[in-house]
Image: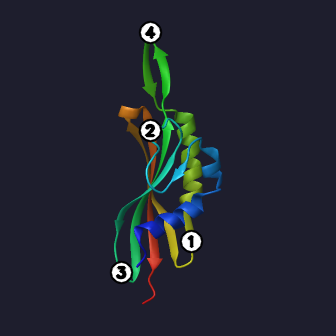
Amino acid sequence: MISDIEVKDNLFQFIKGSELANSVTGVLSKTIRPKNSDKEDIVISILSNQSAQIQEVFVNVNIYVKDLSITKNGSTQNEMNVGRCREICRLAFDLLETGSGENFRFEIDTQRVIAVDDIQHHVINNKILYKHINDN
Protein backbone atom coordinates (compact mmCIF):
# COMPACT_ATOMS: atom_id res chain seq x y z
CA MET A 1 0.00 0.00 0.00
CA ILE A 2 1.19 3.49 -0.81
CA SER A 3 0.72 6.17 1.85
CA ASP A 4 -0.84 9.60 1.45
CA ILE A 5 2.63 11.09 1.82
CA GLU A 6 4.02 9.00 -1.04
CA VAL A 7 1.11 9.94 -3.31
CA LYS A 8 1.72 13.62 -2.56
CA ASP A 9 5.46 13.15 -3.18
CA ASN A 10 4.80 11.57 -6.59
CA LEU A 11 2.39 14.30 -7.71
CA PHE A 12 4.66 17.03 -6.32
CA GLN A 13 7.57 15.70 -8.41
CA PHE A 14 5.30 15.47 -11.47
CA ILE A 15 4.14 19.10 -11.12
CA LYS A 16 7.47 20.61 -9.98
CA GLY A 17 9.32 22.31 -12.84
CA SER A 18 6.32 22.04 -15.19
CA GLU A 19 4.94 24.91 -17.24
CA LEU A 20 2.08 25.11 -14.73
CA ALA A 21 4.40 25.36 -11.71
CA ASN A 22 6.58 27.92 -13.47
CA SER A 23 3.63 30.10 -14.50
CA VAL A 24 2.04 30.61 -11.07
CA THR A 25 3.24 33.38 -8.76
CA GLY A 26 3.17 31.36 -5.53
CA VAL A 27 4.43 28.07 -4.13
CA LEU A 28 3.80 24.38 -4.77
CA SER A 29 2.94 22.71 -1.46
CA LYS A 30 2.28 19.18 -0.19
CA THR A 31 0.87 20.46 3.10
CA ILE A 32 -0.92 23.80 3.42
CA ARG A 33 -1.12 27.14 1.70
CA PRO A 34 1.11 29.82 3.22
CA LYS A 35 -0.80 31.91 5.75
CA ASN A 36 -2.27 35.15 4.33
CA SER A 37 -0.92 34.40 0.85
CA ASP A 38 -2.33 36.46 -2.00
CA LYS A 39 -0.30 34.58 -4.60
CA GLU A 40 -1.22 31.79 -7.01
CA ASP A 41 -0.36 28.81 -4.81
CA ILE A 42 -0.74 25.13 -5.72
CA VAL A 43 -1.73 22.85 -2.83
CA ILE A 44 -1.92 19.03 -3.04
CA SER A 45 -4.27 17.24 -0.62
CA ILE A 46 -5.64 13.71 -0.30
CA LEU A 47 -9.41 13.17 -0.31
CA SER A 48 -9.54 9.38 0.08
CA ASN A 49 -7.09 6.48 -0.07
CA GLN A 50 -8.42 2.94 -0.46
CA SER A 51 -6.28 -0.14 0.11
CA ALA A 52 -6.56 -2.82 -2.60
CA GLN A 53 -4.50 -4.62 -5.24
CA ILE A 54 -5.12 -1.61 -7.46
CA GLN A 55 -5.18 1.20 -4.94
CA GLU A 56 -7.35 4.19 -5.89
CA VAL A 57 -6.63 7.56 -4.33
CA PHE A 58 -8.59 10.74 -4.95
CA VAL A 59 -6.41 13.84 -4.73
CA ASN A 60 -7.12 17.56 -4.95
CA VAL A 61 -4.65 19.79 -6.73
CA ASN A 62 -5.98 23.24 -5.84
CA ILE A 63 -4.65 26.39 -7.46
CA TYR A 64 -5.59 29.74 -5.92
CA VAL A 65 -6.09 32.82 -8.11
CA LYS A 66 -6.61 36.27 -6.58
CA ASP A 67 -9.78 38.09 -7.59
CA LEU A 68 -9.68 41.45 -9.33
CA SER A 69 -10.98 44.55 -7.55
CA ILE A 70 -13.41 46.19 -9.96
CA THR A 71 -15.09 49.56 -9.47
CA LYS A 72 -18.56 49.81 -10.99
CA ASN A 73 -20.92 52.71 -10.44
CA GLY A 74 -18.71 54.06 -7.65
CA SER A 75 -18.66 50.76 -5.77
CA THR A 76 -15.70 48.39 -5.57
CA GLN A 77 -16.25 44.65 -5.67
CA ASN A 78 -14.13 41.58 -6.22
CA GLU A 79 -14.62 39.50 -9.34
CA MET A 80 -12.99 36.39 -10.71
CA ASN A 81 -9.90 37.05 -12.80
CA VAL A 82 -11.42 35.22 -15.76
CA GLY A 83 -8.44 35.54 -18.08
CA ARG A 84 -5.96 34.25 -15.53
CA CYS A 85 -8.25 31.44 -14.36
CA ARG A 86 -8.78 30.37 -17.98
CA GLU A 87 -5.02 30.28 -18.61
CA ILE A 88 -4.24 28.30 -15.44
CA CYS A 89 -7.17 25.91 -16.06
CA ARG A 90 -5.73 25.09 -19.47
CA LEU A 91 -2.20 24.58 -18.13
CA ALA A 92 -3.48 22.40 -15.28
CA PHE A 93 -5.67 20.28 -17.53
CA ASP A 94 -2.89 19.78 -20.08
CA LEU A 95 -0.50 18.65 -17.33
CA LEU A 96 -2.90 16.58 -15.21
CA GLU A 97 -5.11 15.03 -17.90
CA THR A 98 -3.07 11.82 -17.67
CA GLY A 99 0.28 10.92 -16.18
CA SER A 100 2.24 7.96 -14.93
CA GLY A 101 5.30 6.82 -13.03
CA GLU A 102 6.68 3.67 -11.45
CA ASN A 103 3.66 1.52 -10.47
CA PHE A 104 1.17 4.39 -10.74
CA ARG A 105 -0.91 6.36 -13.18
CA PHE A 106 -3.39 9.18 -12.76
CA GLU A 107 -6.00 11.10 -14.67
CA ILE A 108 -8.05 14.18 -14.05
CA ASP A 109 -11.54 13.35 -12.80
CA THR A 110 -13.04 16.85 -12.67
CA GLN A 111 -11.91 20.46 -12.90
CA ARG A 112 -13.97 23.24 -11.32
CA VAL A 113 -13.48 26.91 -10.50
CA ILE A 114 -14.90 27.79 -7.07
CA ALA A 115 -15.21 31.17 -5.33
CA VAL A 116 -13.49 31.51 -1.95
CA ASP A 117 -15.18 34.72 -0.85
CA ASP A 118 -13.57 35.15 2.57
CA ILE A 119 -10.11 35.53 0.98
CA GLN A 120 -11.20 37.13 -2.33
CA HIS A 121 -9.79 34.31 -4.44
CA HIS A 122 -11.10 31.64 -6.75
CA VAL A 123 -9.68 28.15 -6.51
CA ILE A 124 -9.19 25.91 -9.51
CA ASN A 125 -10.01 22.51 -8.07
CA ASN A 126 -8.47 19.64 -10.03
CA LYS A 127 -9.76 16.34 -8.66
CA ILE A 128 -7.34 13.58 -9.64
CA LEU A 129 -7.88 9.81 -9.65
CA TYR A 130 -4.50 8.27 -8.81
CA LYS A 131 -4.07 4.49 -9.18
CA HIS A 132 -1.21 2.51 -7.68
CA ILE A 133 -0.52 -1.18 -8.37
CA ASN A 134 0.40 -2.96 -5.15
CA ASP A 135 2.68 -5.95 -5.72
CA ASN A 136 1.80 -8.52 -3.08
Distance between the alpha carbons at the discs numbered 1 and 3: 19 Å
Q: Secondary structure at mark 2?
A: strand
Residue 74's disc is: 4
Pointer 1 residue: 100
The quadrant of the image that shows the N terminus is: bottom left
Disc 3 marks a residue whose amino acid type is Ala
Pointer 3 residue: 52
**Does label 1 or label 4 sit earlier along the sequence?**
4
**Does label 1 or label 2 sit earlier along the sequence?**
1
Disc 2 marks a residue whose amino acid type is His
103 relative to 16 in the view: left or right:
left
Which residue is at 34% across, 77% downward?
A: 51
**Does label 4 or label 2 sit earlier along the sequence?**
4
Question: Exactly how many numbered labels are in the figure?
Answer: 4
Pointer 2 residue: 122
Where residue 54 appears, as percent x and y from the top left, is: 41, 80
**Does label 3 or label 4 sit earlier along the sequence?**
3
Is the C-beta separation of discs 2 and 3 under 8 Å?
no
Distance between the alpha carbons at the discs numbered 1 and 2: 28 Å
Disc 1 marks a residue whose amino acid type is Ser
| Residue furthest front in the image | 35
Distance between the alpha carbons at the discs numbered 4 and 2: 24 Å
**Does label 1 or label 3 sit earlier along the sequence?**
3
Q: Is residue 122 visible?
A: yes
The quadrant of the image that shows the C terminus is: bottom left
Disc 4 marks a residue whose amino acid type is Gly
How would you rate the neighbour count of disc 1 (Cα within 10 Å): few for under 14, some for 14-19, many for 20 or more? some
Is the C-beta separation of discs 1 and 2 under 8 Å?
no
